[in-house]
Structures are given as C-alpha cells and as structure tokens.
Image (spheres, rainbow, N blue to C red):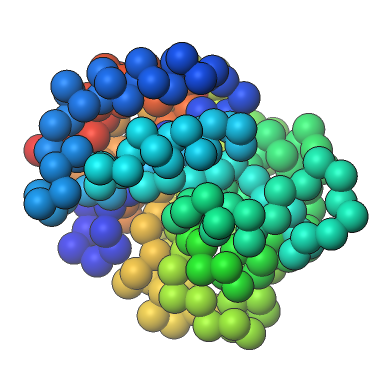
C-alpha cells in the first residue's frame, strides 16, 4: 500500500454476465457497500467495473448514483469509420466510460494484439480522456527461465514514445502473470511485489513523475482469501479481478479488505 497513487479495485467481467446478472449484482452490491452508493461520501479506494460492451449503458444507469467507475475491456485502434465490429474510444467516452483495459493477455494471445497495436489503442483512449489500464505479464516458461522482469518491462516500452508524445497524466498498469489468470494459482505476493517495484522503477526512469501517480495493480486469481497479502505490499496499489469479481459478495469483500 502506498501514499502515492489512489488505490483501485477493478472488476474485469470478460465475456461473462447478462442483463439480469448485471441488475442483481448491483442490487446486491448496494446492500454490501452502501457507502459506494452515497455520493456525499468520499471512498478511500477507487472501484471500477468493466462489463462486456453491450451492458455498458445499462451499468452506466445502474451506477448513476454511485461512486463506482465504469470501464470497457478493449477499444478500437481507429477513431471510427468502416471497421466492422470495432468500438471506438469516442463511443466509450459517449457512454461515459472512465477507464478501458488494453493489452490483456487474452487479447494478446487469442486475438494477436501486439505492443504496437496496444500503443495505438492507448493513444485513442488518451485523446478521449479515458484512463487506459495496460496489462502486462509473463508466461510460466518465461518465469522459469528467469526472464520475467525483462519480458514484462519490455511490454512497457511502447508507452515511452506514445506517452512522451501526448503527456497523458493518467494511466494504470496491471501486472497479470499469465499462469495465474483463471487458474486458481496466484503469484507469491513477494514475487508480485518484486515485479510491481520493477515497474515503478521503470516509470521513474522512463516517464519521470508517473511513478507517483500511476496505480500498479496485481491480477491473477485474486480472491478474498489471498488479497490482503497483496494489498499490504509497498508497490501494489490494488487488484484487477476476473472470476471473483462476478460475485457481488466476493467483490465487496475485496473492496472492504483494501479499506482496512
Ligand atoms: P482471474 O481473477 O479470474 O484469475 O482473472 C484475472 C484477470 O485476467 C483480470 O483481468
């Protein structure tokens, strides 16, 4: 936990949840985290939900009276036009999204998103004043050969030229080792801390000033049983949560754990 960046607990729903599930989730969350639904109350931790694209307007309505941010899980690299299936950053801004995940390992591995493509998406988001959440992280093979830090920092290098050019002051980085995503096998908190500290050093060396403002999250099988061990690490400013964010009671527990 640091005194610098504002901590963030973010839900990545991936391709899960339907209309009714969204409504039930928010109704339950209202009971469990009433202070997040009280606009007069300043919450100590930022909370974000990234639903699938079709439910963003619904979630926007359900969260109208809440201090919970709304985000998307991906964005087009183009600013609009003849790109069938793509959703532009301007559309996300129109729906009042605050954040957008980019470079998730599922996009990198299943949809072949490259660092260059991810950098273009980040630029689109910055132009529309959305906060990009850049996901980075290594495979098990890379970790086993001792290259985890070099590999992960390499995924940040596209940021240097892009952010240097447009002077974005808001960005989130999520460290998500591939072997910990959806497997139930979470990273050792000390290993996650080591990586997040390396990311912060990289920011200090390459984008001076960002190390003080950019929240660095851990993601990969985070659940109420293991979250506190991450949240007490110096360079971990919160979590990007998949599976456990689909159940309101588990997600609420994670938010509460950060507040303790
Ligand atoms: P799980 O929490 O299900 O491991 O997913 C992590 C993740 O990919 C969040 O972006």
The quadrant in which residue 117 appears is bottom right
The quadrant in which residue 241 appears is top left
Quadrant location of the C terminus? Answer: top left
Residue 134 visible? The answer is no
Residue at left 63%, top 61%?
Answer: 90
Q: Is residue 50 above or below residue 91?
A: above
Q: Nearer the viewer, residue 84 or 104?
A: 84
Q: Nearer the viewer, residue 146 or 186?
A: 186
Lateral position of residue 111 relative to residue 62, left or right: right
Lateral position of residue 186 relative to residue 231, left or right: right
Residue at left 47%, top 33%?
Answer: 58
Point out residue 33 in the picture as x, y percentages from the top left corner. Answer: 17, 30
Q: How many marks?
A: 0
Residue 2 visible? The answer is yes
Residue at left 34%, top 69%?
Answer: 213
Point out residue 130 in the picture as x, y percentages from the top left corner. Answer: 51, 62
Q: Nearer the viewer, residue 29 or 154?
A: 29
Point out residue 192 in the picture as x, y percentages from the top left corner. Answer: 41, 43
Point out residue 84 in the picture as x, y percentages from the top left corner. Answer: 87, 44
Residue at left 44%, top 69%?
Answer: 170
Q: Nearer the viewer, residue 165 or 89?
A: 89
Q: Is residue 123 above or below residue 238?
A: below
Q: Is residue 216 above or below residue 142?
A: below
């Amino acid at each position: 936990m640091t005194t610098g960046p504002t901590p963030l607990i973010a839900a990545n729903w991936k391709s899960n949840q339907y209309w009714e599930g969204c409504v039930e989730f928010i109704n339950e969350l209202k009971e469990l985290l009433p202070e997040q639904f009280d606009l007069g109350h300043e919450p100590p931790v930022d909370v974000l939900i990234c639903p699938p694209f079709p439910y963003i307007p619904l979630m926007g309505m359900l969260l109208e009276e809440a201090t919970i941010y709304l985000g998307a899980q991906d964005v087009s690299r183009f600013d609009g036009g003849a790109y069938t299936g793509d959703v532009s950053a301007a559309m996300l801004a129109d729906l009042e999204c605050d954040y957008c995940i980019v470079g998730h390992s599922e996009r990198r591995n299943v949809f072949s998103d490259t660092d260059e493509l991810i950098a273009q998406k980040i630029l689109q988001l910055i132009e529309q004043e959305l906060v990009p959440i850049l996901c980075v992280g290594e495979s098990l093979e890379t970790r086993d050969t001792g290259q985890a830090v070099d590999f992960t920092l390499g995924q940040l290098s596209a940021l240097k030229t892009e952010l240097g050019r447009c002077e974005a002051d808001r960005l989130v980085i999520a460290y998500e080792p591939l072997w910990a995503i959806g497997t139930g096998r979470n990273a050792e908190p000390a290993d996650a801390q080591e990586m997040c500290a390396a990311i912060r050093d990289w920011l200090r060396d390459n984008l001076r000033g960002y190390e003080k403002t950019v929240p660095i999250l851990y993601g990969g099988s985070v659940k109420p049983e293991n979250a506190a061990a991450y949240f007490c690490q110096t360079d971990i400013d919160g979590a990007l949560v998949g599976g456990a964010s689909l159940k309101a009671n588990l997600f609420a527990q994670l938010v509460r754990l950060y507040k303790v």
